[in-house]
Amino acid sequence: MKLRQKLAVVLASAMVITAVPVTTMAASTNSFNKTLSIVADKEITSGQDLMLQVKYADNDVKAAKGDVFFINATDFEFTEKAYNKGTTVGHTNDKHVGAEVEFLSKSQLKVTTTATDGKVEIAIVGTPKKGNPAVTVDGEDSLVTSGKYSLTGAEVVTDKLLAATAGDAKNISVDGYGSIADITIEEKVADSLSKKEVTITLPNSSDLIFNSKYAKGAEVTVEGKRGLAGEVTKLTAKYYEDEKGNVDNKKLVVTFPEMKTGTRGSVVLKGIEVQSEDKKGDVGTGEVKVTVKAEKMEDTKLVVANVTEYGVSFKVDEVEKLVSGKGSKEIELAIKENAVDSLDSKKDIYFTIEEGYFDVESQAKFNEANAEKGLSINKDLDEITLDLGHTNTKDGKTTPIFTADKINEFKFKVNVATKAEQKGPVVVVASSKNFEEDMKVEVATVTPAVKVETEAITVKAGLKDQVGGKIVITETEEESLEKNKEIRINCAEAKYGFDVKDAKVKVTGGDIQIDSEVKNGEIIIKVTRTSDEASTITISDLEITTDRTVPEGTFDFQVGGTAISTLNNKKTGEVKDGKDVYTSQYKDAIELADFVKVGTKNTEDLPNAAVAKEIVLTAGSMAYTVNGEAKTADAAVTIKDARTMVPVRLVADEFGKVDFGTINGVGTVTVFKDGNVLQFQNGSNIMNKNGIAIPMDAKCEIVNGRTFIPVKYVADGLGISYTWDAATKSVTFTNYAK
């Protein structure tokens, strides 16, 4: 792993050492033992006892002895004489714990561990420089966690206001085309970047130039951070041009607008592209450095890329054309090493798909057919795995699919398809710990089969035969809707009480021929002859009945069926009762968002809602009064266990509507009033109101065919008031006009 080069500029000369690890792996725990105040160019001596502590993971303690790793310095120089064996200066070698340390250069130490308990301490002796003094543990090929540990809580003093740093260097193949590392320009004082120009220069010795798209200026993606977050998202980058009009394609100028935030921040320049200076694309391998310059910023050299023959290519044999929801196409994908050892056989490769799906009829068949290639699919995740460590055994001989001493290439074929609502590119993504970042390849482009437009319908709850709404289905080209296939339309939210009773269906454009019917709440349209010209089907004047349980709000409908997607009514691979199991007709449907709107109920729609009533019932008596008018009931109010129980039908019929039924053989009573739905069950002390369970202090019970409920819950549930007269043992229910 290359050491990130970093030169930063700052405002305070005395700093505090702060360990800031940048890695997340758990092989070892690294940190400084203390904090020190430091000054640029003033040596940290061995007498100050600054130690970098490395504690190996518990399971690595035994193997730690003899482990070798390196410590690299940034903006810090190790003192050579302090690390020379046998020296008496500073006695640094006497201070190391569990390690032997060798001075390699002012910027690098070699550490060989001698610890048997997994605990190592390395004395840090040297001179901090201007910038961001730090040490980096390079744990590659060792048991130690790699990480960078800053010696400063802020940067060391300088008169510069801007600093440049680079992200991880990007790999660029020898053809020269690619992107360099992200470059961060950081303000040390607020608004330092406002109206500034930043120049990024490739060395004359480089075989690379900046991409030709910058000749006339091109956008660079930008991410603002801290005070500059959200201030700018794109900037223009252009080749440098001197006073005489001479253009330099190795020098790129990025111009910043006026940005006055009052808070210092930073800007990350992303995806700056380079290409080969030679049209033949013959670029020498090695590090790619740039020099970053700006007013009030020290010239900064950064490693931003590595040109290497190592790497992996990911390609598709041919980009296919797909129609949304209409079958699949076979593609062939290939993963190939650019050079020997570009891949590690211990790291699997995973393939997923964006805006589409792998059309594999049977997971078991696919896995069986591709087992020798190390391939398997997980249909639930829609993910294909390539096991680079897979081996095949035949005639007693074991053969790995990955060969370490040659360039490996892995090819496989799979069908891809898209769903009914998808359009645009279909992309397959290859992910692996072998790659610095996911690799993507476009495998298909998608054209919609139909376009659907709607006019919503507004209905009320609990009313029949409400008419309105329109759905227009237009083919994007002829024959998009196939013969003998069906379009099916219904409410996507089936738990609510929408029932489509009828609709007008006709061809309003083109020459497609259809039959239609409305059955069980579905509009079913069968294509009897395909079109020779793109056609339009219009569904209008939907006749909808709603029950009283439908709440106010908007609800989606859906357009499904076998004419819309091949996923609908397709074999699942399962067999039940000796028969193949098929998917739902709406497994893949086009959503008609907010197609039905349930509006506010009018008082005339609500039973008895606008009528003022007063009902007086007396315990033990069949006689009762309604607004003073004498009437006779078929059941009397009773008192049981100090609870007044009233016959629910009597009260509900006067104030609302009541239905009787059974659930699992148990008698139930359902009461409707003012949009509320109450349900009681014989022997239960639970009242269900609009789907919410409410405990009662007595159970509902049926006596002589009449259902009795505690008086309080009848009144509260219906939203009416009541009073109890203990002297006359009578209860009065009152419903006020609305």
Image: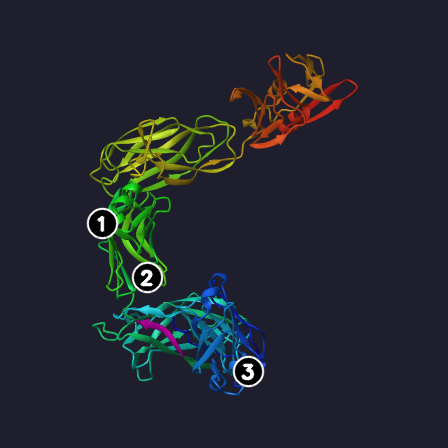
Q: Which residue is mark 3?
A: 46
Seen in the image, is 174 located left or right of residue 168?
left
Other-residue count near label 2 (Cα within 10 Å), few / some / many at <14 / 14–19 / ≥20: some
Quarter of the picture containing the C terminus is top right
Other-residue count near label 1 (Cα within 10 Å), few / some / many at <14 / 14–19 / ≥20: few
Would you say residue 13 is visible in this rendering?
Answer: no
Residue 116's x, y, as percent?
A: 50, 69
Would you say residue 12 is visible in this rendering?
Answer: yes
Q: CA distance from mark 3 to mark 2?
A: 42 Å
Image disc number at residue 394: 1
Secondary structure under the numbered disc 2 in the rendered image: loop
Name the residue rendered at 23%, 75% in the picture. Answer: 278
Type of amino acid under label 2 = Asp
Q: Which residues are magenta?
A: 301-307
Residue 335's x, y, as percent?
A: 27, 58
Q: Quadrant of residue 559?
A: top left
Between circles 1 and 3, the one closer to the viewer is 1
Secondary structure under the numbered disc 1 in the rendered image: strand
Type of amino acid under label 1 = Lys
